[in-house]
Image (cartoon, helix red, strand yellow):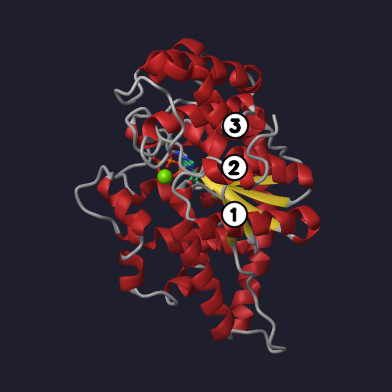
Amino acid sequence: MTVATTVTATTVTAVEAATASETAACAGLDERIRRNPGAHRVLTGDRPTGPLHLGHYFGTLQNRVRLQRLGVEMFVVVADYQVITDRDIADRLSEHAENLVLDYLATGLDPDRATIFAHSAVPALNQLLLPFLSLVSVSELSRNPTVKDEIAHSRQSAVSGLMFTYPVHQAADILFCKADVVPVGQDQLPHLEVARTVARRFNERYPHPDGTAVFPRPEGLLSAAPLLLGTDGTKMSKSRGNAVALAADEDTTARLIRSAKTDTERRISYDPATRPEVSSLVLLAALCQDRRPEEVAEEIGDGGGAALKRTVTEAVNEHLRPIRALRADLAADRGYVRQVLRDGAERANAVADATLDEVRAVMGSV
Ligand code: ATP
Ligand code: MG
């Protein structure tokens, strides 16, 4: 399946909430990567807070696999420390982390080419947080719209300090390996802005003696589905109980899609601005079938929400069948999954140690 592989003129219409300039920036970045994949490095990741879902798959996972196939070097962080930004305890952490790795492997990430590691296994990465925190103000952190949204959906009665420093921690994730490309969903763009600010201020304050910069300028890469909606009509999220997991069985998938919010208009159309829930479902079917969303909507016509949901269910189940089968095979060997994380941690530690040495040197703290 080739859909969502480039942010082209067709996919621009499918981009729901991304602004025209964000979309144009992604198209430009995509073009530069395709011209010279070896000149770029990717960092992406997910919190081990539950099973990955369709939002992850069409929002970032497909893009990661495509970039890997292009030959771009890739680091993937299982962001275990970030689980406790909005929860008191990290529940079933190692189980979620291993499931995350299974989802990665089943969707096509190759551990020989991608460095897959957990935050907590790479101490030098986390140390970057200290100098980085000195580069941003408290008011900048409290203005971050994604932090505000996550606070609104948080399970904690009080907002933790880690929640506010989350974007700076993410800057450390990205910059420890000097990544310049970050395939993300729409919600992460404000965090990317923080990472760019941190990189720019660090480079200005602490240049190398020859004047060169320590860090690159990281850019977010959106897919054709930067904000897939969940069954309740808000962003599909692991923690909002509105997600269809990649690993769900076909009946569960059917039940969840049947429960998805739509509207009362019988004629199905693709109009993300005025009919977000229906359009997100149409887009989902289109992505699975490698078709244009307008064409899918036209075909369902006056069939109403029930026909739309039948189409989406069949499309999702069919598209995910080989991925789910591979995942079930891989799940039989947990030892292999743990080995992937150990190998990844070894490679990530070497890179993080080198970056931290460089940071200490330019800061004069050696
Ligand atoms: P949580 O509810 O625990 O925050 P989540 O579902 O939001 O989980 P994250 O681990 O926070 O998942 O996000 C991992 C990556 O997946 C990010 O790049 C994020 O932008 C992307 N992503 C998550 N949900 C969606 C979605 N509904 N549509 C597109 N991209 C998404
Ligand atoms: Mg999230």
Q: Nearer the viewer, residue 337 or 30?
A: 30
Secondary structure found at label 2: helix
Rendered-image quadrant of the N terminus: top right
Tell me residue 268's x, y (percent). Answer: 42, 24
In the rendered image, the vertical position of residue 82 relative to residue 322, given as above or below: below
Q: Looking at the picture, does residue 50 appear above or below residue 258?
A: below
Give me the C-alpha separation between circle 2 and circle 1. 19 Å
The amino acid pointed to by label 1 is Val
Badge 3: few (under 14), some or many (20 or more) residues near its Cα, within 10 Å?
A: some
Residue corresponding to mark 2: 11
Residue under numbered circle 3: 292
Query: Going from the N terminus, do you reach mark 2 or mark 3 first?
Result: 2
Q: Inspect the image, locate mark 3, and give the three-letter code of the amino acid beneath it.
A: Arg
Disc 2 marks which amino acid?
Answer: Thr
Q: Which residue is mark 1?
A: 182
Which sits earlier in the primary sequence, circle 3 or circle 1? 1
Q: Is residue 255 visible?
A: no
Task: Categorize mark 2 by other alpha carbons within 10 Å: few (<14), some (14-19), many (20+).
Answer: some
- Pointer 2 residue Cβ closer than 8 Å to ligand 1: no
| Residue at 44% from the left image edge and 48% from the top image edge | 17
Q: Name which of mark 2 and mark 1 comes first in the sequence.
A: 2
Q: Nearer the viewer, residue 222 or 209?
A: 222
